[in-house]
Amino acid sequence: MRPTARALMAAAMQSGNSLKPTPMALLPPIYLYRRLLRAHRKHLPAEMRLLGDEYVKAEFRAHRSVENPVHLIGFLTEWQLYAQKVEGDAWRGEKLDEGKIQKMNDEQIGQLYELMQAIQKRGTEGNES
């Protein structure tokens, strides 16, 4: 059953938060992983899907042995927000939040830079064909 906007609003009002959204329940890693790949398959063009799938697989593989619960919750939360954006086509033209960039460590900034280069490389390869 798909909740309607009216039902969601009523639930928010009953919880006493007025218009604040209630915290989302985190999906278990395997379900989130599958949801991400499914979202890529349904909502992304072929080139972006390949790049996105590679990145999702690498990130989940790299975080397979994480034991810090705070790190794990942050990881799952961000990927779940990403999945919601892809499914709703809200990601197009969106820029990264400055606060999130400032919280990144040097390794994460490097990964972001590598991802940007991979996207630009695929874009130039696609234009040459």
Image (cartoon, rainbow, N blue to C red):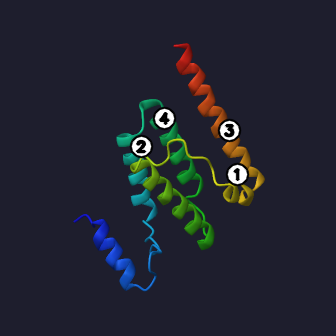
- The residue sitting at the top extreme is 129
Looking at the rendered structure, the number of numbered marks drawn on it comes to 4
x, y (%) of residue 74? 58, 65
Which of pointers 2 and 3 lies earlier in the amino acid sequence?
A: 2
Amino acid of disc 3: Glu
Which of pointers 1 and 4 lies earlier in the amino acid sequence?
A: 4
Label 1 to label 3: alpha-carbon separation? 10 Å
Q: Circle 1 sits on which residue?
A: 108
In this orientation, which residue lies closer to the viewer: 66 or 79? 79
**Do the residues bearing badges 1 and 3 touch, measured as CB atoms within 8 Å?**
no
Circle 1 crowding by C-alpha within 10 Å: few under 14, some 14–19, many from 20: few
x, y (%) of residue 10? 32, 78
Which of pointers 4 and 3 lies earlier in the amino acid sequence?
A: 4
Q: Circle 2 sits on which residue?
A: 40
- The residue sitting at the right extreme is 106
Label 2 to label 3: alpha-carbon separation? 20 Å
